Image: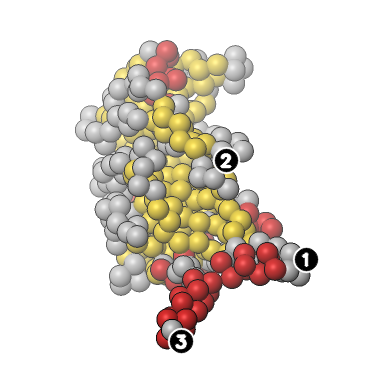
Amino acid sequence: MIATGLISLVSVGSALFRREPGLLERATQVADVKLWWGPEPVVCEYRWISDAVVFTGSGDWRLRDPFLYDIRSRQSTPLFGLRKLLEKDNDMGTQSWELSPDRKWLLWNMELFDDVHAARLDGSSFQTVSLPRPANTVGQIAWEEDSRHWRAVGFNYASRETTNIFGGDVETPGQRRFLPVSTEKDFFEPRAPQVDSEGKYVKIESNQNLSSPPHSAREVLYAPDGTQIIAVEQSHEGGRLAWVLLSTHEAPLMHWLRRLFPHQVAPVQASAEIWVSRSNGREMHEIGRRLLSDEDEKIDPLHGLQWLPSARRLSFLYKDALWTVPTDR
């Protein structure tokens, strides 16, 4: 009888004090980003070339001094050929840039210039396509799924309207092609998951083929009870989602103490959590959470969330470091 009572007491105690592993306990710090971007970067942009190699650049939100970083050897490889091409027209830097789906090409346009450029990351191949009139500025740019074709929006500031949709083919440098302006909404509306302003639900585009208009309705997925959606990222192949959620919670022991001493126990804490699910929202499970102590952290508590190409790990930025975490349970 006494033994049974002791076992029950131990079981209750274990339940009260049990703590799930924190996000940083499961994660691995793979890079000190202060060495990349400085102590206070405006925008932190990076892309995974493989599960071991990151593409990024130094400085601010413009892409400058591009390089590859190997998280295994902790070594950087400057891309001098691409750097010369980025600085070819002026020293204003890129206005926007996109990596091709196969992660071999870079597409970009320059601040105050009307051309669109595409180059291999090693700088071995390069093309420029000029903006057709009457457009006087380049709007959005995007790759098609084949990593060969790209398209851009020609916009006229005076008339405040899109004047043309044009594109190029990296295998036929300098050749410009035109598409109907009516395709702008189909080809340039965001294909990435779109979170509503209150963080209650997210819209998922079921057709990720950038070579053709979507034609398919977006699926709406709602946040789990008691949480707010901060960000959702879709894996490269489109089959899985990574969620950054904001929630308030309390440990079992705190919940028990709150019932006994409702005016003495500290209020619940907010936490930022990473969850993973299928693209339809099923099989959703938590990867890890981090308690928030600074009110400002709740705006963007885990920024820079990305899938690694294999979808076995996720990455995020926290306290001047790049971290990766496994996506299994």
Calculate the distance from the C-alpha at mark 3 to the C-alpha at mark 2.
51 Å
As drawn, 328 above or below 208: below
The residue drawn where x is 38% and y is 62% is 325
In this picture, is 149 found above or below 86? above
Spot occupied by residue 272 in the image (x, y as percentages of width and height): 55, 57
Q: Quadrant of the N terminus?
A: bottom left
The residue shown at (39%, 63%) is: 324
Type of amino acid under label 1 = His
Q: Which mark, residue 263?
A: 1
Is label 3 in contact with label 1 (beta carbons under 8 Å)? Answer: no
Q: Which residue is mark 3?
A: 2
Residue 250 on image: x %, y %: 60, 63
Residue 137 position in % (x across, y down): 52, 26
Near mark 3 (Cα within 10 A), the count class, few <14, some 14-19 or many ≥20, is few
User: Callout 1: few (<14), some (14-19), or many (20+) C-alpha neighbours within 10 Å?
Assistant: few
Q: Residue 44, can we see it?
A: no
Instruction: State the residue in front, 210 or 221.
Output: 221
Q: Looking at the image, is mark 2 or mark 1 nearer the viewer?
A: 1
Q: Is residue 294 above or below residue 199?
A: below
Residue at the image point whose x is 43% and y is 19% from the top: 184
Residue 77 in percent (x, y) is at 33, 63
- Can you name the residue that lies furthest to the front here? 1
Closer to the camera: disc 3 or disc 1?
Answer: 3
